[in-house]
Amino acid sequence: MAVIVTRAAAEAADWVAQLQAHGLPAESLPLMAILPPLDPSPLLRAWQGLQRYHAVMLVSRNAVAHFFAEKPLKSQAERASDAIKNAAPEFVTPAGTAADTTGGTRYWATGPGTARALRSHGVPANQIDSPGYDAPQFDSEALWALVQARVHPGMRVLVVRGQDEATSQTGRLWLAEQLTEAGAQVHSVLAYRRGAPTLTPAQGLRLHTAASDGSVWLFSSSQAIAHLQQLAPAQSWHQAKAVVSHPRIALAARAAGFAVVCVSRPTLAALVESIKSLHD
């Protein structure tokens, strides 16, 4: 029983290694290509005005990676802080003031993986709001339950998100709608594009054999399932099994024709247990 990991290539390699360490014969078959934005200038402007926002919400690890890839060597807030220190070396900036680069802005993440990516880019853990490992799901709803009480009229929130290259859609607007209804001012910036991958001949062959050889497909995105159908429009999935990380993805897998669909929490331990249950 092979486990087919369908995340974008860089993430897939990490998940393959973790699943193999738990004794599962995992292999990578990326069904998502992550590309930089066509115009990175809005990201640079977002960084230059970052101190204006009370919170920055990043939708995924890819959003974190591409957002921080455009970070200037020094932000406007950091330059202001340097100016104050140079003018009065004995002055200590109070936490939370405009010149402080760590106390004012919160960073919101939909799950532990995104929070971990933020920490890897130097964001202190005490500035990050994210559902914990014990949360039932890692999504916008779980994040909203965590931050809702602190949202107030006039609050400024920047949403860093991706865009589907084929349709120009930018993902779910649910959280932005909740914020707007609560009186917050929501702005968004595109950090990356999601597109269909280009498969090698070997990957194309593996895609078809894995439809009926007992392999378990691991999906963390409905878009990956859409790309699968685009790449193999005539392929039947009525013998195929899937483990998915969210009920919305389960709906897409069933609509595509997968015979067995198991919904799992998106933690490594839960996914391993779900995959093994399909083999028993």
Image (tube, helix red, strand yellow):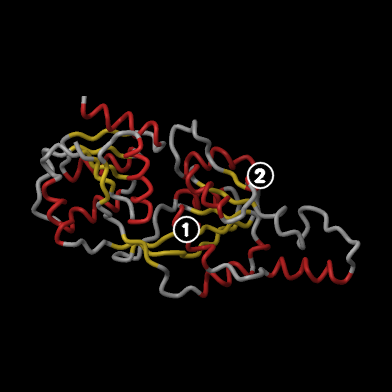
Near mark 1 (Cα within 10 A), the count class, few <14, some 14-19 or many ≥20, is many
Which of the 4 image quadrants contains residue 18?
A: top left
What kind of element bears circle 1?
helix
Judging depth in this view, the residue of 134 and 164 nearest the camera is 134
Judging depth in this view, the residue of 220 and 213 nearest the camera is 213
Q: Which residue is mark 1?
A: 63
Q: Position of residue 253 (x, y in %)?
A: 23, 43
* Residue 126: numbered disc: 2
Q: Position of residue 173 (x, y in %)?
A: 44, 53
* Residue 99: numbered disc: none
What kind of element bears circle 2?
helix
Residue type at mark 2: give it: Asn
Q: CA distance from mark 2 to mark 1?
A: 20 Å
Q: Is residue 73 left or right of residue 213?
A: right
Query: Who's the residue at 63% across and 40% down the image?
Result: 149
Q: Position of residue 188 (x, y in %)?
A: 51, 62
